[in-house]
Image (cartoon, rainbow, N blue to C red):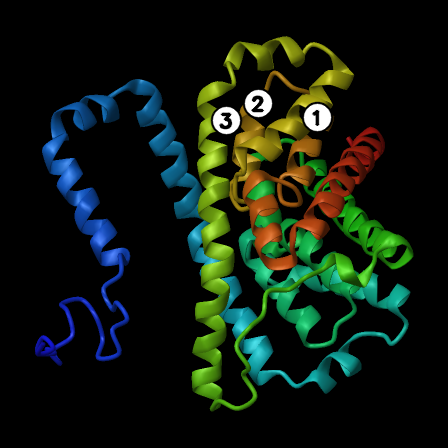
Amino acid sequence: MAEPAHDPTPPAGTDDDGSRWWRIGSLEVLAALFLLLVVFQGPVGSFLSTPRLQTWTTVFVSVMVQSVPFLVFGVLLSAAIAVFVPRSFWARALPRHPALAVPVAGAAGVVLPGCECGSVPIAGSLIRRGVTPAAALAFLLAAPAINPIVLAATAVAFPDNPEMVVGRAAASLLVAVLMGWLWLRLGRAHWIRLPHRPELDDLSRGRAFWAAVRHDVVHAGGFLVLGAMAAAAINVLVPERWLRTLADNPVLSVLALAVLAVLLSICSEADAFVAASLSQFSLSARLTFLVVGPMVDLKLISMQTGVFGRRFMVRFAPTTFVVAVLVSSVVGMVVL
């Protein structure tokens, strides 16, 4: 019996070796979503017009608009540190003893005009370049709160209370230094798991710079979006009348504004104006809001998870929150 003729042409959707080359990618997913929006445009339009969703969208967009420019600035600076700054520079710039390097790195935050979104990738790049993690973390916490733009915004927001500027700078720097020293004492190297970056040494400086930028945007930017979505949801779900009730209790008011700072996730350049609007709360409670926000909030927690790993975040963020509340409360009693 004659064997059937063999057709050498591979089936459609396969390579020459018979393996399939057609896979669902981002373009196919986007086309499917577009088709669904066209088919169900009536129900989707009605859903998007609800007041709660409009509030959610407004908050989400505002957080992203505030954060993205500084995230981009931080990513660019992080890539520049990784590519153009030699490791030997940090050995000369910081004291050799880690305990002395921590306050120096924290005080260096005053020269960076950015917010917390940019400080996360910069701290990760500093660790990659050989800076002791304790010093990099002190810089991460201090830079968003004591830089000139933030302190100037605080002075404008509280024109009748210049002591708020002094209190914010002192409390924020003290928290950053204490957390750096605490990491020296209790921190473990394996708690920090920086995501693998493409090898940069074999590339030209220009290509290495953009490779580092693309890498950090993917890792930090994606978690920023998740944090902004969570912050927007909290803004919609937390009733305003709860805040008025808590403001009457001195202890609960401090804790309430500390938690609110975490949930709102406001950029440090803008949080002073929000704190000034919370006039039903005491100045000490509002100082806690200003100290906690740039150090621990939902978008920061998400970004720290993406840049440093989950093991780091579950230890660092809660500890920073407790130290920030305690220090800001003490400084508030002394300064305000």
Q: Which residue is mark 2?
A: 278
Quadrant (top left, top right, bottom left, bottom right) of the N terminus: bottom left
Q: How far from the left and from the top, in percent, is residue 281?
A: 65, 19
What secondary structure is marked by label 1?
helix
Task: Give the residue type that dot 2 points to.
Answer: Leu
Q: Which residue is mark 1?
A: 285
Q: Residues within 10 Å of mark 2 (few under 14, many from 20)?
A: some
For the point 56% across and 88% down, the residue is 201
Q: Which residue is mark 3?
A: 234
Task: Give the residue type that dot 1 points to.
Answer: Ala
| Closer to viewer: mark 2 or mark 3 | 3
Measure how far apart labels 2 and 3 are at the Cα level: 17 Å
For the point 18% across and 66% down, the residue is 13
Among all residues in the image, which is located at the extreme front? 1
Using the rendered view, name the quadrant where residue 236 is placed.
Answer: top left
Seen in the picture, residue 209 relative to 236 is either above or below; the reply is: below
What secondary structure is marked by label 2?
loop
Q: Circles 2 and 3: CB distance less than 8 Å?
A: no
What secondary structure is marked by label 3?
helix
Q: Circles 2 and 1: CB distance less than 8 Å?
A: yes
Q: How far from the left and from the top, in percent, is residue 286?
A: 66, 29
Seen in the picture, residue 281 relative to 64 is either above or below; the reply is: above
Measure how far apart labels 2 and 1 are at the Cα level: 10 Å
Q: Horizontal placement of 177 versus 276: left or right?
A: right
Viewer-proximal residue, 60 or 13? 13
Measure how far apart labels 3 and 1 are at the Cα level: 20 Å
Viewer-proximal residue, 16 or 234? 16
Task: Give the residue type that dot 3 points to.
Answer: Ile
Viewer-proximal residue, 327 or 184? 184
Q: Horizontal placement of 181 versus 271: left or right?
A: right
Seen in the picture, residue 134 relative to 266 is either above or below; the reply is: below
